[in-house]
Image: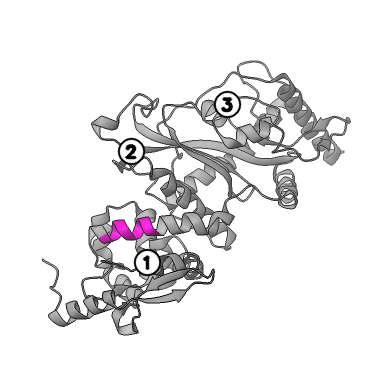
Amino acid sequence: MAPPKKSKKLKKDAKKLKKRKIKNKTKSGKIISTVPVDNKAVDSDWWDSFWHKNSSSPGLSIPSDEAEGFKYFFRVSKKTFDYICSLVREDLISRPPSGLINIEGRLLSVEKQVAIALRRLASGESQVSVGASFGVGQSTVSQVTWRFIEALEERAKHHLKWPEPSKVEKIKSEFEASFGLPNCCGAIDATHIIMTLPTVQTSDDWCDQENNYSMLLQGIVDSEMRFLDIVTGWPGGMTTSKLLKCSGFYKLCESGDRLNGSAKMTFEGQEIREYIVGGFGYPHLPWLITPCEEDKELSSAMLDFNAVHETARSLAVKAFSQLKGGWRILSKVMWRPDKRKLPSIILVCCLLHNIIIDCGDRLHPDAALTCHHDSGYLGQSCKQIDPIGRTIRDNIAKHLRDTKSSYSS
């Protein structure tokens, strides 16, 4: 059925609102053009309309409780949603909302714009499908989502950055308390964001080991599965070890400007410097500790180390499963994305992942992927082993053994 036509009066009112721009000052003193509107002209009851229209969608297990239903559709609680709106509000009202009018002729509120963007990122559904659920067109979904991405990328930077020394100490304490690993600052992993590309843009660089066109995302997480550092934008045809070496994090660590805190002494007086843990696909370095190869006979201490290491490393695996499950635009095959814009989409999804944690919120239990975040991809193996890194790994294994002995005696 065709959407109802706007009445002449509504069209005239909308046109007047576009013309009546006034100038205001933002908190930063910047002069912006805004549109003076009254409540009747703004689509402020968007949630009631959305819930009434979508709460009984066939084939979906939508909670009957509205608060849980809100989180089901947008991945965040109403409180976290309001916080996100506060971050981007100034940017979303600072430009005249040209064309951002729903089928009833009312301007889209900031809240409805944020809801549209979150639903697009959370569901990974087509712009047409998302638009239909809100009563707006495909072009509006496209415009609103990109405006939101640009705004949050700028306004939420503080939610994804390498922590201050005091916070690093807290992270290390949490890793040691949870896993027994001394001086561990995080866990690293990488995943593929799969896409289709126009024939003119395809190349072997973007074609990965499973013959998919993809973009890589590398992330380092803390003990709460919060992303501390990410790198993306690189072709899926690269190995994870090469991606690491192309990252700013690698350069900072190699120059001594990161993971450079005080060393921890073992029971035998050996020093263990700060490090992160990663899988077999990464080089074994003084600051990146990988498991010991299991193709040779291992001591009981090293077998125990491998088990502890895998448990700690799995935090990064779980974080990516939550990221790609919560923001399913990353787990579905993207149809011809702009490769210049895709890194921003990925970054914003990581920011939203962190905002949920920082706000004390939790993903809906059914949101995370039930399978591995890189399902279908075989594990990679890097044979590079730094001698100093091997010594540090041995010292960690001995420390775990001695700690275990001290508890049992």
Question: Residue at (47%, 58%) from the top-left corner?
Answer: 152
- Describe residue 352's horizontal placement relative to residue 292 as left or right: left
**Amino acid type, mark 2:** Met
> Which one is earlier in the sequence, the residue at label 2 or at label 1?
1
> Which one is earlier in the sequence, the residue at label 3 or at label 1?
1
Q: Visible in this render: residue 146?
A: yes
Give the spatial CA distance, label 3 vs label 1: 48 Å
Label 3: which residue? 280
For the C terminus, which image quadrant?
A: top right
Most foreground residue, 341 or 239? 341
Q: Residues within 10 Å of mark 1 (few under 14, many from 20)?
A: few
Find the magenta span and give its range: 140-147
Magenta segment, principal secondary structure?
Answer: helix
Label 2: which residue? 195
Residue 257 x, y percent position in the rendering: 70, 37
Q: How many marks?
A: 3
Q: Residues within 10 Å of mark 2 (few under 14, many from 20)?
A: many
Identify the element where label 1 is drawn. Answer: loop
Question: Residue at (46%, 26%) from the top-left corner?
Answer: 238
**Amino acid type, mark 3:** Phe
Q: Is residue 293 above or below residue 22?
A: above
